[in-house]
Image: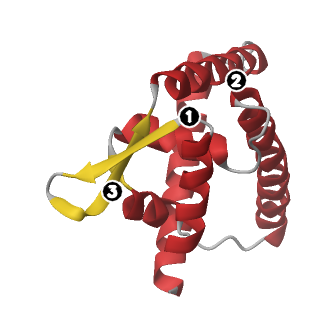
Amino acid sequence: MSVPNEEPLLAVEREVGVLFRRGRARVAELSRRVHPQLEGMAYSLLGHIEQAGPVRVTDVGVHFAVGKATISRQIRALEELGLLAREADPLDRRSALVSLTEDGRRRFLAAREARMARVRELMDSWSEEDVVRFAELLHRFNDVVGDAAVSAV
């Protein structure tokens, strides 16, 4: 689809920028809610690991598009705080699987519930149809962004 008028595309670019800036700040805040020593993307890492179940450290790095050294350092910090546990991968003893500890799961779920309460509050005036459509459009946009990132490599 070609948009002859650039203004809608500029509006999308502006709004996505606002969303990303606010999102980074919110994720850092949620990370600190999980544990006061956390910052940055720790909440997102915990969320991915919680959803994926025991997952290989290398797969976490691939999911977040970060190198082995970066993801290993972040995983190690979460382990040291008692939020993650590491075990040998039974299918490949050279690899490690990580999963949330009970404390890590409890803390993550409490932070997620606080976040979801805020999302419910913010979207309370939206119809269910609007929320569904918004989720579909965000998913579609993220797919396009993900495809563009892969093809740029």
Looking at the image, which is closer to me, 38 or 126?
38
Identify the residue at horizontal 54%, vertical 44% (top origin).
79
Kind of residue sitting beneath label 3: Ala
- Is 112 left or right of 7, judged from the image as shown? left
* SS class, disc 1: loop
Expressed as whole percent of the image width and height from the top left, the position of residue 22 reads 84, 45
Q: Dot 1, how many residues are within 10 Å of its Cα: few (below 14), some (14-19), or many (20+)?
A: some
For residue 78, side relative to residue 54 (left or right): right
Q: Is residue 7 above or below residue 86?
A: below
Outermost residue toward the left in this view = 91
Q: In front here: 19 or 97? A: 97
Q: Residue 132, how many percent across, how many down?
A: 53, 28
- Regarding residue 67, the answer to whether it shows in the image is no
Q: Name the residue: 54% across, 63% down.
A: 71
Which residue position is annotated with label 1? Answer: 82
Secondary-structure class at tag 2 = helix
Residue at 59% x, 44% y: name it.
80
Q: Amino acid at mark 1?
A: Gly
Q: Give x and y (percent) for residue 111.
A: 67, 23
Q: Nearer the viewer, residue 125 or 53?
A: 53
State the image coordinates of residue 45 (x, y, percent, origin top left): 56, 47
Q: Which mark is residue 96?
A: 3
Of tags 3 and 2, the one toward the viewer is: 3
Q: Residues within 10 Å of mark 3 (few under 14, many from 20)?
A: some
**Chain-order first, disc 1 or disc 2:** 1
Q: CA distance from mark 3 to mark 2?
A: 30 Å
